[in-house]
Image (spheres, rainbow, N blue to C red):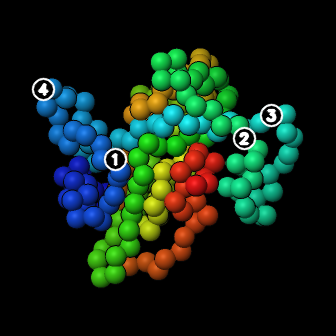
Amino acid sequence: MVLSNVKIHEALDAGRLVIDPQPQPRTPTIAAPQCPYDTSAVDLTLSDQLSIPLPEKPFVFDLRKGGLAKFLSENTRQVTIDRDGGFALKPSQFVLGNTVERVGLPIIEGQSCLAARVEGKSSFARCGLIVHFTAPTIHAGFEGRITLEMINLGVYPIMLYPGMRICQLIVEEVSGTPFHNQSQFQGQTKPAGTS
């Protein structure tokens, strides 16, 4: 079951969902009409860090070997997005970014817990920007910043700026209490998936 914006607020207040810093304002006002809480999702913002694959390092991914976070951190260059100038994501260019917000979906014994999906925003998709593809699930028990796998499938460069509302988090109720099974990306703070 997908949570409404009202239920997202209740989950935040109860500690069943952690978003730090919490998106504001919680409801639209005359002074702040751009509310990040849609009817069934909450917008998250882009950090100022990108990881860009190094094209001069030829390699072939062998996903059977594991250790992907370490491999990516060694084979990408880190870029800080200029607050004023932004970063022009060229057509067919792939980068890793992450959210400003840390998201936590704690598993609390005896309580129902939450999972989430991160999805792009339709206005960006119409320009050709894919924000998070093939792996939108944020599992119960996860804690960390969300890595965004971004690619420009359009024909024009797309400007990325730190703090822009880049994706939406859709929160869902989990049936039953799962056992803990942390991924290699637990606690990630950098786009490549490391701390």
Image quarter of residue 87: top right
Residue pointed to by mark 4:
30
Q: Please, what secondary structure does the residue beneath circle 3 have?
A: loop
Residue pointed to by mark 2:
76
Q: What's the amino acid at mark 1?
A: Pro
Residue contact between numbered discs 4 and 2, judged by CB atoms under 8 Å: no
Q: Quick one: label 3, few (<14), some, or many (20+) residues within 10 Å? A: few
Residue pointed to by mark 1:
21
Label of residue 55 in the image: 3
Q: Residue at x 59, y 45 (%)?
A: 191
Q: Quadrant of the C terminus?
A: bottom right
Residue contact between numbered discs 3 and 1, judged by CB atoms under 8 Å: no
Counting residues from the start of the chain, the first of labels 3 and 1 encountered is: 1
Q: What's the amino acid at mark 2?
A: Thr
Q: Please, what secondary structure does the residue beneath circle 1 have?
A: loop
Q: Please, what secondary structure does the residue beneath circle 2 have?
A: strand
Q: What's the amino acid at mark 3?
A: Pro
Counting residues from the start of the chain, the first of labels 4 and 3 encountered is: 4
Separation of disc 4 and disc 2 at Cα? Answer: 43 Å
Q: Quick one: label 4, few (<14), some, or many (20+) residues within 10 Å? A: few
Q: Quick one: label 1, few (<14), some, or many (20+) residues within 10 Å? A: few
Mark nearer the viewer, 1 or 4 = 1
Residue 40: percent from left, percent from top: 28, 48
Q: Residue at x 38, y 79 (%)?
A: 177
Separation of disc 1 and disc 2 at Cα? Answer: 27 Å
Nearer to me, 108 or 118? 108
Nearer to me, 194 or 170? 194
Counting residues from the start of the chain, the first of labels 2 and 3 encountered is: 3
Residue 151 visible in the shown view: no
